[in-house]
Amino acid sequence: MARSINSATQTQINTGRIARTEMVLFDFPSPTGQKGFFSGQGELQWSGITFYGAGTLFEISTIGGAADGSAVPLAIKLNGDVRSGLTATVLAQIESVQYRNAPVTIYRRYMHPETYAELSTEAVYRGRIDTIKHKISEGGECSLEVAVESRMIDFSRSGHRMRTDADQRLIDANDGSLSHVQTTAEQKIEWGKIPTKQKRKKLFGIF
């Protein structure tokens, strides 16, 4: 899908000198609420939301796409670091949150390579959390792997509603626009010349 890029960002891209950072926003149910992280250090304020820097602890798989518009999954990984307080116990606290189907948005922030002033920030992926796996290695390293489903998957799901007169009248009792749909679907139409009826021969004078 084509995206428009503002002139300031395009100018820096054309010169081959631009800085960028990836941002992820988890929209968990109350009372947890929104949690934002970015691939940098410190804190980043954007659109009234605080994004916390996770640096190299934060990884996002390549954001791809399909020509037919089908859903493309995404993986987000948060590595633990004892020095930063992200121990296995801390990461396990995610299990107390109702994260299933929580919305996730990935943003890409473009910045000036010298001043790091924001040039533009755009959403590049929207999805929902499917599963979260905890991984702990023998050396004590721990991480969270978040599997995200693209919102495009909704377009591949079929609904339970039918194009029938009964279902249409549940929406509007006076709408009879589909009253003849079933009749039309089952109507047999003879094409071409109407065949002439042939007289049946009587058998033994009974018929």
Image (tube, helix red, strand yellow):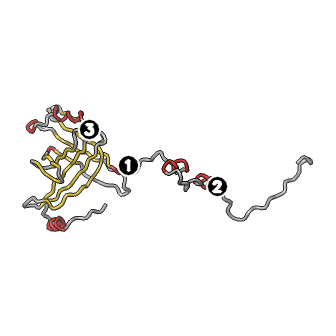
In the rendering, which numbered label is found on residue 185? Answer: none
Q: Residues within 10 Å of mark 1 (few under 14, many from 20)?
A: few
> Is residue 95 positioned above or below 186 on the image?
above
Of discs 1 and 3, which sits in the foreground?
Answer: 1
Q: What kind of residue is marked 3? A: Ile
Q: Quadrant of residue 115?
A: bottom left
Q: What kind of residue is marked 2? A: Gln
Q: Identify the image quadrant of the N terminus.
A: bottom left
Distance between mark 1 and mark 3 Cα atoms: 21 Å
Q: Is mark 2 on a helix, strand or loop?
A: loop
Of discs 2 and 3, which sits in the foreground?
Answer: 2
Disc 2 and disc 3 in contact, CB within 8 angstroms: no
Distance between mark 1 and mark 2 Cα atoms: 34 Å
Disc 1 and disc 3 in contact, CB within 8 angstroms: no
The residue closer to the viewer here, 67 or 116, is 116
Disc 1 and disc 2 in contact, CB within 8 angstroms: no
First of labels 1, 3 by sequence position: 3
Expressed as whole percent of the image width and height from the top left, the position of residue 9 reads 17, 64
The residue closer to the viewer here, 136 or 100, is 100
Identity of the residue drawn at 14% across and 34% down:
87
Identity of the residue drawn at 36% across and 58% down:
67
Residue, disc 2: 187
First of labels 1, 2 by sequence position: 1
Residue, disc 3: 132
In the rendering, which numbered label is found on residue 154? Answer: 1
Q: Residues within 10 Å of mark 2 (few under 14, many from 20)?
A: few
Expressed as whole percent of the image width and height from the top left, the position of residue 204 reads 91, 47
Expressed as whole percent of the image width and height from the top left, the position of residue 161 reads 48, 47
Q: Extreme right residue here?
A: 205
Distance between mark 2 and mark 3 Cα atoms: 53 Å
